Amino acid sequence: MKLLITICSLIVVTIASAVQASPQEQPSAPSIQGKVLQEPDGQPIRKASVQLSGRRGPGEAKYSAVTDAEGKFGIDDVQPGQYYVVVEHPGFVQAGTGGRRVSILVQAGSGKNDLILHMQPAAVITGKIVDLDGDPMRDVSVSAIGTGSAGGGRNSHSFGNGATNDLGEFRISDLQAGRYKITASPPQGSHPPVLKENGGEKDPSIYLTTHYPGVLDEGQAVPLEIHAGTETRINLSLLTGRAYRVSGTVTGVPGKGGMTQIMLQARGSGGSQMAPQELGEGGKFEFTNVLPGSYVARLITVTFEGGQPAIQMLRLGQSIEVDNAHVEGLRLQPEVGGQVRGKFRLDTGEKFDWTQLTVALMSTEEDGVEIGWQQGGMGMPTVSGVNIDGAFEMKSVPGGRYQLEVGARSDRLRDYITKSVSLDGRDVVDSGFSVLPDTNLDVVISAKGASIAGTIVDAKGQPVANATVVDVPSEEHRMRADLYQRDTTDENGHFNLRGLNPGKYTVLAFEELQEDVRQPGFLKSYDKRGESVELDEGTRKNVVLKVIPIEGETP
């Protein structure tokens, strides 16, 4: 069973000991000293802020210093440990990192350690947003996101935001060099000037979110390449589209008190979402400015049980199709849910401490909307404990299709796998199941998980530290999140993916990975750059993989 651990891509900076204590001397507390230099001329940068923060969380020690006129800085009495290093100065960005966070290791008794950090002039994107007539548009939000910047491993200089002024102009500064996708978002529901009447009703066109160089589909957007120390200017015209009303009534709302809202979201991953609204008297609702397309309606209820918020997100019937006309008079009702119970057993029949396990229900709905049974207001699927006899129970689960995911409270169980989940004699571990008024599952786990270990090397055959290694299961198993493992290589380039079910996998290694490996087209982007591995129960396979470099870098 999989333990979900997110590990950021890092660049490890080796810091050399400048002074070593003799065996007779008492070692002093480690210190960091160094310089901040500008690329490419090596000129010192004064008033640069150098910050060290512990890698293990916000509670770890933090240190900071400011460079002098010669670009020098010093930090004394640094506690041993691993630290992120961030250098900031207006108009500059940290150089030589590829956008990744820099990490250093400070060892006890290392005395003074020298660290050389580099910065380069930042890039700037400026431009003008206009309507289709070429007139300037104000209060348009403009975002620039570096390609591959979706994950948390990128630093703050790989994305930026701005807004247009009365001249329709915007400016996004302090960006690192690279390729960026530019998106312009008008104020929600803003309309072009009305030029005609249509059946006594105003033309329902609205301004739409537009991607550079002037497309509605984000997949057709063209990244803009920017360079260090330069200002790149663009012009972008906002597109328009016709919009309609969707209205009706929701009946059968569960629970009393608290807050009840309705949400409308376009089907498909990344679909646009209408702002949630509270239900009116008698459960009435009305969404305006809805674009043509297929939508899913959800009911969000927030109640308080024992002083703690409990959130439910319920599906309201089938898809809502908006096709060049208003959709009115809808009567929506939450899908019927039920109870989900189950019992665990070990494939060998031996005794087991079942209280070390947890279970969670994950939606398998294919409409791009995250749904589930949520408590605590944290937006996470509900996790339930398991009783000492292996039994578990989840009450009042919303209607829909789910998969059961098994988790563990201890790292000692990393080699255990979920072997099967049966409902009425059918194995639903891959397909998932629909919640019935009373759903009873039989869950079998095994200690015979397989593993994939090995070494990641660069184009010259040298081991690569801090590379991200992932596996992707064969197509018939790709709905199962527990089959996707991830590890980060150590200083020798070694990795180990554990707790895998039998089957076929593709293993890939990235210098930096920001994409979602569960997206349908993920493997197509890296055809023949991974290693195919077939695992039997309890086996261990070893591979040597070449790292996939950061986009734009030479392999």
Image: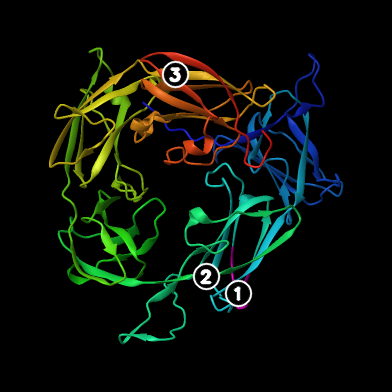
How far apart, in angstroms, are the residues tagged by discs 2 and 3? 51 Å
The residues tagged by marks 2 and 1 sit, at their Cα atoms, a distance apart of 11 Å
Residue 283, image x, y percentages = 20, 67
Q: Which residue is drawn at 62% across and 50% down?
A: 158
Q: Mark 2 points at which residue?
A: 238
* Residue 285 makes an appearance in the image: no
Magenta part of the protein: which range?
162-170
Q: What element carries label 1?
A: loop
Q: Where is residue 532 in the image (x, y as percent from the top left)?
A: 47, 23
Residue at figure coordinates x 67%, y 26% from the top left: 459
Residue marked by disc 3: 451
Whole-number angstrom distance, CA of label 3 to CA of label 1: 56 Å
Residue mark closest to the camera, 2 vs 1 = 2
Q: Which amino acid does label 1 sit on?
A: Gly
* Mark 3 neighbour density, 10 Å: few (under 14) some (14–19) many (20 or more): many
Task: Label 2, secondary structure: give it.
Answer: loop
* Residue 78, horizontal then vertical, whole percent: 69, 33
For label 1, the crowd category at 10 Å Cα-Cα, with few meaning under 14, some 14 to 19 and many 20 or more, is some
Asked whether the beta carbons under mark 2 and mark 1 sit within 8 Å of each other, the answer is no
Q: What residue type is labelled 2?
A: Leu
Q: Earlier in the sequence, mark 3 or mark 1?
A: 1
- Residue that badge 1 annotates: 168
